[in-house]
């Protein structure tokens, strides 16, 4: 459950619908697969084995190949909030590389979206810092493979330029989704015509 009045990072980024033109049932099915895979990875972190359907199993096997190859210490973060911007995001996990904890996000998408993932990671980095959590400026997006093969890993680094883009996206989202009292008055007038 998300606190009332907070906007999810995914909502801010959804203003650029990358799935326009894709059948709704396909998007819903892929979302269910993604949720199942994420839950199985959380279960893995807690030493709980979860049964997955055939569609999700390959992605989980891809995660296991990545994990067994790297064997990074891993921990959960959960949902974080920023009271200043009233935004929230749920970070998939942190992995420890050397002496630093790094954000990692699991993806089950069939295509890589470098710009969108960079913005998402930057927002997550911001949320970690806003919550006074020690975190590396490097973050990872791991594109799990449906066939269970080794995933593709995209590496990003938090920086001021991308944070400025995130803030622009945030401002646009707030502007486009705010309730405008003038337009409410106009719509009331048109109802009486």
Image: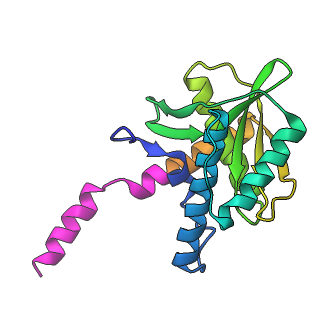
Q: State left or right for residue 47 relative to residue 1.
A: right
| Residue 182 within the segment the image draws in magenta | yes
**Is 95 located above or below residue 27 in the figure?**
above
Magenta residue span: 172-193
Whole-percent x and y of residue 37?
Answer: 64, 53
Q: Residue at x 66, y 44 (%)?
A: 41
Number of numbered labels in the structure image: 0
Please provide percent x and percent y for residue 65: 84, 47
Q: Residue at x 43, y 29 (%)?
A: 83
Q: Quadrant of the N terminus?
A: top left
As rendered, which of 164 and 142 lies closer to the eye? 142
In this view of the protein, can residue 35 be seen by the observer? yes
Q: Residue at x 81, y 30 (%)?
A: 72
Instruction: Say left or right for 103 vs 145.
Output: left
Residue 66, position as x, y percentages in the image: 84, 45
Q: Residue 47 sits in which quadrant?
A: top right
Residue farthest toward the left in the current orientation of the protein? 192
């Amino acid at each position: 459950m998300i606190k009332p009045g907070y906007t999810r990072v995914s909502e801010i980024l959804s203003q650029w619908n990358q799935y326009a033109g894709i059948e709704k049932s396909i998007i819903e099915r892929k979302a269910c697969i993604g949720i199942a895979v994420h839950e199985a990875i959380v279960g893995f972190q807690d030493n709980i084995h979860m049964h997955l359907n055939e569609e999700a199993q390959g992605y989980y096997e891809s995660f296991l190949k990545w994990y067994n190859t790297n064997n990074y210490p891993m921990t959960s973060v959960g949902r974080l909030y920023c009271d200043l911007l009233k935004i929230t995001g749920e970070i998939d996990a942190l992995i420890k590389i050397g002496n630093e904890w790094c954000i990692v996000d699991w993806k089950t998408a069939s295509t890589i979206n470098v710009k969108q993932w960079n913005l998402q990671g930057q927002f997550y980095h911001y949320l970690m810092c806003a919550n006074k959590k020690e975190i590396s400026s490097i973050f990872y997006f791991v594109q799990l493979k449906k066939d269970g093969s080794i995933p593709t890993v995209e590496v990003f680094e938090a920086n001021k330029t991308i944070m400025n883009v995130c803030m622009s996206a945030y401002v646009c989202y707030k502007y486009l989704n705010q309730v405008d009292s003038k337009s409410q008055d106009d719509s009331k007038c048109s109802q009486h015509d």
